[in-house]
Amino acid sequence: MTNRKTVLVTGACINTGVDIVNKFAENGYDIIFTGRSAEKVSIAESEYRKRFGDVNITGFAIDSLNERGEVDTESVDALFSELDRRNIFVETLVLNAADQGLGQKLFENPISDFIKVMNTNVVWNFCLCEHAAARMKENGGGNIVFINSNTAYRAIPDRVAYVSSKGGQLGLMRALALDLGKYNIRVNAVLPGMIRTDRWEKNPEFYASVPSRFTPIGDIATGEDVADAVYYFAAHARNTTGAELVVDGGNTIQLYPIIK
């Protein structure tokens, strides 16, 4: 088995996932990443390899749910079986992929929409954790980092499934940290607020006045800011588990935004 460490980052074809991959690759990690679209995974893999010629980078197309809306456990089994076959040990798992649950309104959306978000953001992530942790246990330890959200504590309109899932995900993080600590497996969470993603770039008028952009420090997070927090947990926080690191410019601490 290679002496280089390997990180698995879910949802790493665009936005923050790309920045997380870049951070670990720049620091000498080999990279496994996932995305929902085989075409997008192939494009991202090619771009990563051009940038990081000395890093082993492999992408896998995998979705959280099957056609019935159930957690696709078979795909997770297949992913880790393939990594085993290649003798690749995932030392760090970064759970970045999420169902945003946009525009889900009470009394209008069917219950299946709520279940879909919960299945992706909580149950699917648990499935990935269980597979990764089983191998970490046999290899002397490892790290799991959830990309959570400050909406786990502060609700936003028409996002009831997403907000619920992020609160549940923090409970999952803490429970895993407790149960896995004896195996030298640390489990933590990064809680971003608003991030400058492609949605920000494509909707400048909306994001110019949205309240959550008005933070105490006057700026919102970039993907690089989130990646720095993830890397801290993975590479430096030896005695930290079950912890949350908020990356939102202080948004969570203010009672209301000071809009200027």
Image (spheres, helix red, strand yellow):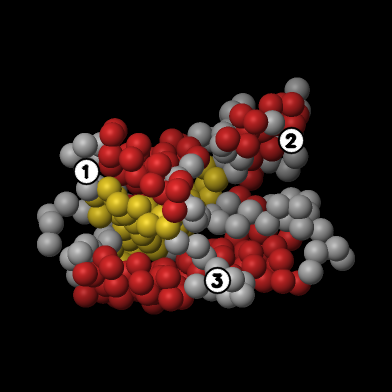
Instruction: Please state if 80 lies on the left or on the right of 242 as rendered.
Output: left
Say which residue appears at 65% left-offset and 31% top-offset: 202
Quarter of the image holding residue 18? top left
Q: Where is residue 80 drawn, in percent x and y? A: 32, 69
Residue at the top extreme of this rendering: 260
Instruction: Please state if 32 lies on the left or on the right of 118 as rendered.
Output: left
**In the image, which is nearer the foreground, mark 3 or mark 2?**
3
Say which residue appears at 40% left-offset and 42% top-offset: 43
Question: Can you identify the residue that label 1 sits on?
Answer: 55
In the rendered structure, which disc, 3 or 2, sits on the residue that comes first in sequence? 3
Instruction: Please state if 114 lies on the left or on the right of 8 as rendered.
Output: right
At label 3, which amino acid type do we have? Asn
Residue 66 badge: 3
Say which residue appears at 42% left-offset and 70% top-offset: 75
Question: Callout 1: 10 Å neighbours few (<14), some, many (20+)?
Answer: some
At label 2, which amino acid type do we have? Pro
At label 1, which amino acid type do we have? Val
Q: Where is residue 110 drawn, in percent x and y? A: 79, 69
Gap in angstroms between the C-alphas marked 3 and 1: 32 Å
Q: Camera-side residue: 14 or 216?
A: 14
Say which residue appears at 20% left-offset and 64% top-offset: 86
Quarter of the image holding residue 197? top right
Gap in angstroms between the C-alphas marked 2 and 1: 40 Å
In the rendered structure, which disc, 2 or 1, sits on the residue that comes first in sequence? 1
Residue 211 badge: 2
Q: Helix, strand, or loop for circle 2? A: helix
